Image: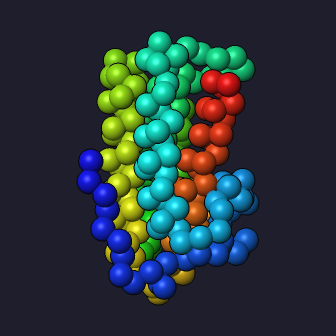
Amino acid sequence: MTTIDRDPIADGVPSKPPALDEYFEFYAGYVSQVPEGNLVSLAEAQITEMGDFFRNVAESQAVVLHAPYTWTIKQVVGHLIDTDRVFADRMHRFASADFQPLNGMDQNLYVENHDYKTPSLASLVEELLLGRRANVLLLRRIQPAAWDRRGVASDHTITVRALAYIQVGHITYHLKILKKRLG
């Protein structure tokens, strides 16, 4: 797989978390997961981190339901695919000054209505990583002024910056849980 070209205009990329008024409090747990640094670089680094982690997960482990969790590892990967897409769509729309309010998502409906059993774990991880690569390229194109744009998603006001932080923090949050599950 190829690496993503470095962005020559890094000074327009957020490196400090969004303020509390930039997102709904539900997402604070994800925002708090993001370390300091260039947000695009952090999102890009997750491509390698996820690839390295999932490469060491056996297919047989990926279909086991570990109590008290309600999803298999393959379903968690599917959830990451789904949410990364939804967060990226919201980010793309609001950064483009398309401020039509967007509905929320029911994560359980997504997992229940997509096949996360048949594809191999490797195939699902490839989809996740390709989606994240596309999202990093999107982040690189966001103009500096657009990071502060606000839209409404799930009946709450949110900025483009907050969505990007949530996207990175969401992956970090779930990787921590998966590492704990697998010991």
Q: Is residue 120 or residue 105 the one in the foreground?
A: 120
Q: Is residue 172 above or below residue 154?
A: above
Name the residue located 61 percent from the left edge and 40 percent from the top edge. 174
Q: Is residue 56 left or right of residue 162?
A: left
Tell me the quarter of the picture where residue 89 sits.
bottom left
Looking at the picture, does residue 89 appear above or below residue 152? above
**Left or right: 111, with 120 as reference point:** right
Give the answer, above or below, for where 32 lies relative to 150: above
Residue at image coords 43%, 49%: 47
Nearest to the observer: residue 176 or residue 102: 176
Evaluate whether residue 52 shows in this view: yes
Query: 132 or 102: which is nearer to us?
Result: 132
Q: Residue at x 50, y 46 (%)?
A: 49
**Residue 139, relative to residue 115: is it above or below?**
below
Q: Residue furthest left?
A: 2
Residue 103 shows in this picture: no
**What percent of the width, then of the height, locates residue 104?**
53, 51
Query: Residue 78: image x %, image y %?
Result: 45, 34
Q: Residue at x 52, y 62 (%)?
A: 42
Q: Quadrant of residue 139?
A: bottom left
Q: Position of residue 91 (x, y in %)?
A: 45, 66
Q: Quadrant of the C terminus?
A: top right
